Amino acid sequence: MRKVLVPFLAACLIAGLTGVAAFSAPVPRKAPEFVIQSPEGKQQLLSSYKGKTVVLALMFTTCPHCQKTAGILSGVQKEYESKGVQVLGATFDQGAAFRVAQFNKMFGVTFPCGFSTEAAVRSFVGLTKDEPYFVPILIFIDKTGTIRSEYIGDEKFLGNQEVNIRAELDKMLKGSASSAKTTGTSSKKS
């Protein structure tokens, strides 16, 4: 009985982790409004970037993977800004409102990065209140405001994220972005 139970529980755990995105919203889809509160207290609306290709990074200030992602995205912002790309960031871990300014300074963030709430992030991504997820979450939105792809803590995508982010942006800028939705197990879980 024990030999059967252990593999069964392991299979359930794996199925649960790999199926995290099964309940979130499909892509492509119109990006709903999303509000990022800046460290200075100003609100930034995602809709104000319509006409640009947007990379939205949803991160925890305390997550090493998110910290690395913030640094990579700062380089991407500099490289792709002249091509109409805007990187945006929102931290949403508990206490992010108090830590985001230090996060931005410590990791050399060169793009608008503020904070939001977990509820707002779950709603934007299409995750239910109890669905587990992993961070960082990277969302690629085209010039029309349509989410073309999203990567919810995707270990494969994040494994070589610098190359993968540029490849995703190059596809979108050429107008041949394919829809992709993945979920991984690389970072912190809520």
Image (spheres, grey):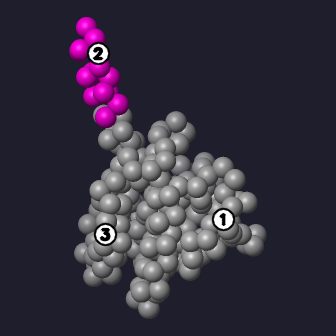
Per the image, the residue denoted by label 1 is 100
Which label was assigned to residue 154?
Answer: none
Q: Is residue 131 above or below residue 162?
A: above
Spatial separation of the CA atoms under disc 2 and disc 1 = 44 Å
- Badge 2: residue crowd in 10 Å (few <14, some 14–19, many ≥20): few
Residue 2: % across, % down: 28, 11
Spatial separation of the CA atoms under disc 1 and disc 3 = 25 Å
Residue 15 picture quarter: top left
Between 63 and 32, the one nearer to me in the picture: 63
Residue type beneath disc 3: Asn
Between 88 and 188, the one nearer to me in the picture: 188
Residue 117: % across, % down: 64, 53
Q: Residue at x 61, y 52 (%)?
A: 93
Q: How many marks?
A: 3
Q: Is residue 39 magenta?
A: no
Magenta-colored segment: predominant secondary structure = helix
Per the image, the residue denoted by label 2 is 5
Between 72 and 39, the one nearer to me in the picture: 72
Residue type beneath disc 1: Val
Residue 183: % across, % down: 36, 50
Magenta highlight range: 1-14
Marks 1 and 3: CB-CB under 8 Å?
no
Which label was assigned to residue 164?
Answer: 3
Q: Residue at x 36, y 39 (%)?
A: 17
Question: Residue pushed farthest top?
Answer: 1
Q: Is residue 50 visible?
A: no
Q: Residue at x 29, y 62 (%)?
A: 179
Residue 13: % across, % down: 35, 31
Q: Is residue 171 above or below residue 32?
A: below
